[in-house]
Amino acid sequence: MKELIRFIRRFAAPYKWNIVVSVFFNLLTAFFTLFSFAFIIPILQMLFGINTQQYFYMEIGEAGLKDVLVNNFYYYVGKMISTEGPSLTLLFLGMILTVMTLFKVLSAYASECATLPLQNGVVRDIRNAMYRKIVSLPIGFFTNESKGDIISRMSSDVTEVQTSVMQSLYALVKYPIMIIACLGMMIAISWQLTVFVLVMLPVIGWVMGTVGRKLKTQTLAGQQRLGSIMANIEETISGLRVVKAFNAERQMERKFGGETEDLYRIHNSVGRRYSLAHPMSEFLGTMAVAITLWFGGSLILSGKSSIDAPEFIYYMVMFYSLINPAKDLSKVSYAVRKGMGGVQRIDRILNATNPIQDPPAPKDLPADRRKSSIRFRDVSFSYDGERDVLSHIDLEVRPGETVAIVGQSGSGKSTLADLIPRFYDVENGEVEVDGINVKDLRVKDLRSLMGNVNQEAILFNDTIYNNIAFGEKEATREEVIAAAKIANAHDFIMETEQGYDTVVGDRGCRLSGGQRQRISIARAILKNPSILILDEATSALDTESERLVQEALEKLMKDRTTVVIAHRLSTIVNADKICVLHEGRIVEQGTHSELIELGGIYRRLVEMQQV
């Protein structure tokens, strides 16, 4: 329950007035519940001859105000019975009871409506908080997390919190008020009998709690298994071509079937325990009523009780009115335990730390940002803290210079480029932009200098126009079209059905690889960055597409500081400097011709591609 309280404090604070309003209407509901029963029992006693006392009209001052009001009420009821008859009196009684019940249900309805913004608003806020956290976390966080599992946390885990925790908040506001109200009335009627009840109820609560104690653990296991299933689905869809090419359908089906079988067993176990809540609370509640009925009735029959039979009837009505919300509250505890597993998985994202932070006193970039310099000073980097991916890198890229990074796969080329925009932070050494350590700059300012074109063109399921203008809110349509023309994309865009308003599909699936890449280049052109990072931007293209993309890249690279990670060495022949990475170290530097004459690793790489 402590976890639930922390959870409510964190997310429910903006909705405190909804809770206040709900509490107010729940107090009204409790009032009408208590006094509708208190009102009806004495009248029934008079109607059916149980209470034969004669009442006379009393003036205010003859007794206490309460006694005068009660006496005069019974006086007028007795008078109505004698003058109008029992039948009409009973009809009048039914009308009053109906009106009081109407007020009770209206106040109950109002209290529930008051909590709806709380229930749904907290779920909305959790999703927004998770999304903000996901987009703010560094790329390194997602190398250790499955995309499918993260999606599961944002979908099924949040839904579990909504159904199991947030919908229980209304019950946590409503039922304790009703329980306290009924218990207070029971104490007022007979505190001795209530002491007996209070001794018995904790025993019943302990039995219920024992059954529900494992729900949270089992639900957490189920949510983790569901996350694994979502990850499996995401991997299967992404790699469906490979699955079919290797005839691995049955293998994937067996793996998926095993995971769903585990989830099936967990859900059955959770469902059995959750379903046990209602019948167990029903049985234990009835047993509590029966024990109380026997104990209180025995006291009255033996003459040892301070209350009479009618008061005991009302006492039992109050006790039964307490049992129902107590049973429902016990089911709430089951639901909360069930939902807290999802809360724990959500917290793993919300409580994740982001090491990429703005400095306490950030420095400002130079006013002239058309060209920027980059400097690596004795940089070493490791992903796991054990094996260095980069070792003692010293490299300078002057303003407007094009530097190409080449080397075998796994040599650290992409890692080197990722250190410039602080996708990762260096552990040893410094990375400088315009002579300033990147850690001394605001992350937003640093990345505003840079444009990225990667091997895989990342497009969103939106229009071509919005993909080009991505991140540039103030871009005009003319500027978007101009960027597309420079990127050799305008012609094919105009050939599509709706031109710039054509939706590209999931990850740009309605476009060819070359078309996707040219839109990606147009996006970088529109940003007009002073530093350009090209990560094997043409390696996955056919010859014709590569020619068009290369032309667009040359226009983009003009008069910009450019770092090119090259797979096809023919594309970086004219680079100002070529750096050869081998096992995380720069082993050769120079122009294309200088490195060819050197006869080292670079020359062997060129000769291998010419074969």
Image: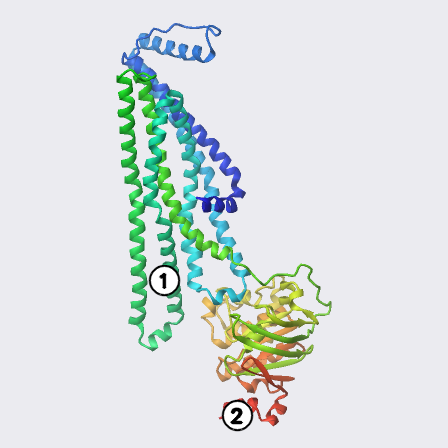
Q: Residue 607 has which mark? A: 2
Q: Quadrant of residue 203?
A: top left
User: If the image is split into quadrants, where does the N terminus sit?
Assistant: top left
Residue 273 on image: x %, y % = 30, 47
The reply to whether residue 463 is visible in this rendering is: no
> What residue lies at 48% left-to-right and 31% top-to-bottom?
24
Q: Is residue 345 above or below residue 503?
A: above
Residue matched to label 1: 229
Q: Is residue 301 above or below residue 205?
A: above
Does 249 sit left or right of 488 as displayed?
left
> What residue lies at 39% left-to-right and 27% top-to-bottom?
183
Residue 420 on image: x %, y % = 61, 71
Residue pushed farthest right?
Answer: 367
Residue 483 on image: x %, y % = 60, 72
> What residue lies at 54% left-to-right and 43% top-to-bottom?
14
The reply to whether residue 428 is visible in this rendering is: yes
Q: Callout 2: few (<14), some (14-19), or many (20+) C-alpha neighbours within 10 Å?
A: few
